[in-house]
Amino acid sequence: MPRRRFATYTSMLTAAMVAFILGFPFLLVAFARATHCAPDTCGAVGLVFGLYGRMLSVLIYGTAMLTVISARCRRAGLSSWWVVASLFWLLAARDVLMTGLNSWAVGFSLGILSFQWPITLIFFFAFVTFLSLWKGSDENGSEPPRRSWKMAHVSAALSAIIGVVMCIPLFVTLAWIGGLRLISPQSITMFPQHYLYVRIGTHFMTLTTALWLLLLVFAGALRHILVSQRRESLEVPPTRFSRPVS
């Protein structure tokens, strides 16, 4: 997929998803009124619509975005590993995507009582922005600086691994639904944030802190790659003047 078409598709999909999330409370009210539910059953109607309606929208958005990212990476000569990293960035941000401006009962039903900054979602959009601006091999773009590209790879890989760890409650829940009940989902819900940390002296580095640090490295590396490519495209070979003959 060409770079400009990729930028157009991702912008349209993201704008539609943001508009859907912002307008979701109004959709809940309209759906409750359309069903003519009784006062004691409107809460259940809102829960069902808020849960499955938002889940379907997030699934459609995630599938569409991963599809265009895969097409762009294939066209630009990038590894398909970036699609896998993007998948886990989205999965790790499921609490924001599912409960943001949603019915309050949905958060309780999913075990998501609160959510922090969607850091992995920022990783995702930073990479999408990079793909929209960076000229790959299909556009005769220059090779990215090796050091910056390596830093981007390492920070993205580590953030994706942390995303996998943050998705452990989701995997356990899906296994529970599938009949593989090795451990209770309730006992593992708060495991990533409250039990996985590194103590450095009197300070503690949690997964959230590590993600912020990796995000700074990742965004800085991608920015340096874009700036370097832009500088190379603006460089004009010096004009050689012939020496006058006396």
Image: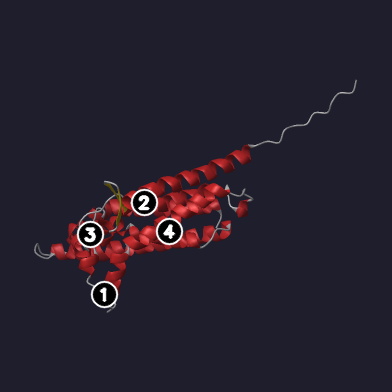
x and y, in percent, of residue 173 in the image: 27, 70
Q: Amino acid at mark 1?
A: Trp
Q: CA distance from mark 1 to mark 3?
A: 17 Å
Label 4, on which residue? 86
Tell which circle, 1 or 3, labels the residue nearer the N-terminal end: 3
Residues marked 3 and 4 touching at CB (< 8 Å)? no
Q: What residue is pinned by disc 3?
A: 112
| Residue type pointed to by label 3 | Ile
Report the residue at 46% width, 48% height from top: 129
Taking the view exactly as shown, the residue that stands out farthest to the right is 246
Q: Quadrant of residue 157?
A: bottom left
Which image quarter is the C terminus in? top right
Which of discs 2 and 4 lies nearer the camera? The answer is 2
Q: Earlier in the sequence, mark 2 or mark 4?
A: 4
Q: Residue at x 42, y 51 (%)?
A: 125
Q: 121 or 13, which is in the foreground?
A: 121
Q: Residues within 10 Å of mark 3 (few under 14, many from 20)?
A: some
Distance CA(mark 4)–CA(mark 1): 25 Å
Residue at the disc numbered 2: 211
Give the CA separation, mark 3 to mark 4: 22 Å
Q: Is residue 58 visible?
A: no
Mark 3 residue element: loop
